[in-house]
Amino acid sequence: MEYSPPPFFKRGPNLLTRLTLFSLLSLVLLFADARFRYMEDIRAVVGVILYPFQELVDTPARMARGMANYFSLQSTLRSENTRLREEAFVNAGLLQKQQDLIAENANLRELLDLGPRFEPSSQVASILYTARDPFVRQLVVDKGETDGVVPGAPVIDTLGLVGQVHRVYPWASEVTLITDREQVIPVQVVRNGLRAVIFGLGYDGALEVRYMPVNADVEKGDLLVTSGIDGVYPPGLPVAFVDSIERNAAYPFARYTLNDPDVPLTVYLEAFNPLIPLDVDASSLPVAVLRYVLVNSGEVERLHGVVFRHAYLYSFGSTICSPSSANCSGSS
């Protein structure tokens, strides 16, 4: 007589079937969310449901911070009070000067028959916590859709631009910092009005300005502010100070990769003309530099001969190496 286990112990589909099913479901949901934004409403509902639990979990940390602030040393509070009074005194003078500049600017715009500038509204928000994803630079603030926050709104602090509102929930919002890899901000140099584009590097405390001419008039210590040409960030918001400048004399340059499936050799060719910043005569010399990198991609330990042919090649040097070599290059 054949014995079968009771229904309570039936396990259903095997593990491989369930893994395949849920993997396909995950891919479909990822595609739908990235392409059609179908998950925004679901994410908002989940955010509303989890908000009370987040507040409950964060309560002990807030209480601990409050207790620490309450028992701060009196000397610390006294020094902070003195510093704030000095800052308020300095800012009062700057504010009076700014009011005069605003009135003067309004009169000039009226004389030139220009429309008034749009003055965006603002509100104060507090940081709740930072994002758990280590590959993004985001944080969550305590203002959301019910407070009038909209996606794409700029976020600033006392020093300048912080980031941009990425996603809005009813009582909270996600803010992407300007140091995130996906952030691109049009800026200009305050000193001379030179426009540029600044990119986030993916870690805190550093930004990068790319695609600038080698002889661009940029100096260490220059202040970069938003230019406003993107229509996202209002103009004039401080973004960063120039900390270091790297000028590449091999500009413009091109890099080519050559390979043949029948030949166990990969050739990398870099071609550029020497460019000396602010020296027109030396940069106009009819000279080109060709740099070859040959990598043995086959099983043979050494290639015994390589032939170069070039109609205008006067001299060259080359190096052939196996895949285990660290540096191998040649130039002509």
Image: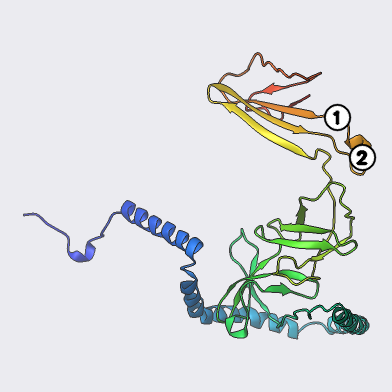
Q: Secondary structure at mark 2?
A: helix
Residue shown at 63% from the left, 79% from the top = 149
Question: For mark 2, what is the residue?
Answer: 280
- Amino acid type, callout 2: Val
Q: Nearer the viewer, residue 241 or 260?
A: 260
Vertical side of 6 occupied by 64: above or below? below
Residue shown at 48% from the left, 79% from the top = 49
**Quadrant assignment, res 299:** top right
- Amino acid type, callout 1: Pro
The image quadrant where one finds the N terminus is: bottom left
Q: Secondary structure at mark 1?
A: loop
- N-terminal of the pair, mark 2 or mark 1, is 2
Does 211 sit left or right of 111 as displayed? left
Q: Nearer the viewer, residue 73 or 259?
A: 259
**Quadrant assignment, res 21:** bottom left
Marks 2 and 1, how far apart in space?
A: 12 Å
Does 321 sit left or right of 3 as displayed? right
Residue shown at 81% from the left, 71% from the top = 236
Does 236 sit left or right of 301 as displayed? right
Rendered image: mark on residue 311: none
Give the mark count.
2
Coloration of the structure image? rainbow
- Crowding around mark 2 (Cα neighbors within 10 Å: few <14, some 14 to 19, many 20+) is few
Vertical side of 64 occupied by 235: above or below? above
Q: Nearer the viewer, residue 34 or 328?
A: 34
**Quadrant assignment, res 104:** bottom right
Vertical side of 246 occupied by 260: above or below? above
**Quick one: which residue is furthest to the left in this view?**
1
Estimate the x, y position of residue 264 in percent, counting from the top left.
57, 22
Rendered image: mark on residue 286: 1
Estimate the x, y position of residue 70 in percent, counting from the top left.
74, 86
**Quick one: which residue is furthest to the top in this view?**
304
